[in-house]
Amino acid sequence: MATNGSQKKVGLAPDRLASFYGRDIVSVMQFSRDDLTYIFGVADEMRSLVKRVGATDLLKGYVLGNLFYEPSTRTSSSFIAAMERLGGSVIPIHGVQYSSVSKGESLPDTIRTLQCYADVIVLRHPEIGASAVAARYATKPVISAGDGTGEHPTQGLLDIYTIYSELGAVDGLHVAMVGDLRNGRTVHSLARLLRLYDTKMTFVAPDILQLPADLKAELEDSGRVVRETGRLQDVIADADVIYVTRVQKERFDDLRLYEAVKDYYEITPELMEQAKPRMALMHPLPRVGEIHYDVDDDPRAAYFRQMENGMYVRMALLAAVLGKV
Ligand code: NCD
């Protein structure tokens, strides 16, 4: 619920202005296909800017509050790098055990505090819906960096951006999502975004890790056919994108269940021989055994490019919510 969204910015198409300037980013459901096209265009510009000169002063004087209640390497450091490459600065709060959260401070009060000092807040939190709650209390834009097993909207955006940059299009593709589809928030955001495209989606997981029933119903209600299987063999030769995820150990109450499913799938060089010559193997990372290290040199292994793309997409989003593009 940011209040600075009413200011007009020259050079931004009015519909895009309404979509991003001063807005929170808490779910991919808020985006249209045009919004994605717009942000990806800006991300392309950010990429060429970084390659050419490394940094700019577009967000000089602006401050990002980077508030992480859960572990993170890529999301947190790519937001920091994004803000700094745009000339802004960052208040990093990583170990919340060292902040007043450990004294029992509530999320709304922590947000009210941080926004006194920052112009935009990035929040990762273990509870579904936490970023929407934070957004209600904040007068500055709140960007979710993942809320529990809910969504991870900026990862969803960088995943679609990566599919475009790897394969040139999203329409017409067969996207297979593999692994912990129940708890993996990146899959939840990606599947919701793929609704906007003419794609075939197959969800590959053991029964206990299949998509949550409400998300499955949501996809079906939007006219998508939801194909579920437990076998990688059913998709390996046909998929244009194989999006692999880690089994999310930290979401299991019963670790025996985790042990039973943790090694269910492994992408190996032998398996990759059966995949299409032109396809993208993706993973939000970190991996813990789902993709063999010997696959890394395969030109179809897109996961390291995918994480680099995260910085360009986050640069685009920060500049957009602060009204600078
Ligand atoms: C993911 C996350 O935190 O949801 N990581 C990331 O942000 N790239 C995936 C995961 O933790 O498995």
Image (cartoon, helix red, strand yellow):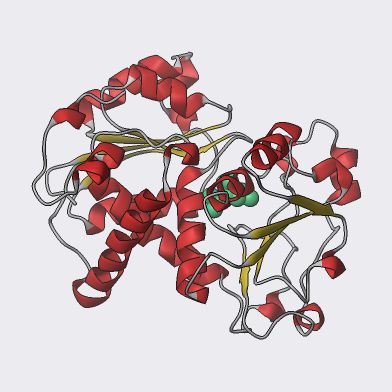
Residue 28 in view: yes
Residue 105 image offset from top left, x and y in percent: 44, 14
Q: Quadrant of residue 112?
A: top left
2 with respect to 270 (left or right): left
Camera-side residue of 239 and 125 = 239
Visible residue check, residue 81: no
Expressed as whole percent of the image width and height from the top left, the position of residue 29 reads 49, 38
Residue 210 x, y percent position in the rendering: 79, 44
Q: Position of residue 213 (x, y in %)?
A: 76, 34
The quadrant of the picture occupied by the N terminus is top left
Residue at 58 percent of width and 28 percent of height: 128
Q: Is residue 105 above or below residue 213?
A: above
Please, which residue is most extreme toward the left here? Answer: 10
Residue shown at the point (38%, 19%) measured from the top left: 136
Q: What residue lies at 55% left-to-right and 42% top-to-bottom? A: 71
Q: Quadrant of residue 201?
A: bottom right
Q: Along the line of sight, which residue is nearer the eye, 21 or 140?
A: 21
- Residue 57 left/right relative to 312: left
Residue placed at 42% from the left, 51% from the top? 33
In the image, residue 25 sits, relative to residue 203, either above or below, namely above
User: Which of 134/320 is in front?
Assistant: 320
How many callouts does the rendering have? Answer: 0
* Nearer to me, 112 or 10: 10
Left or right, 253 with respect to 300, comes to right
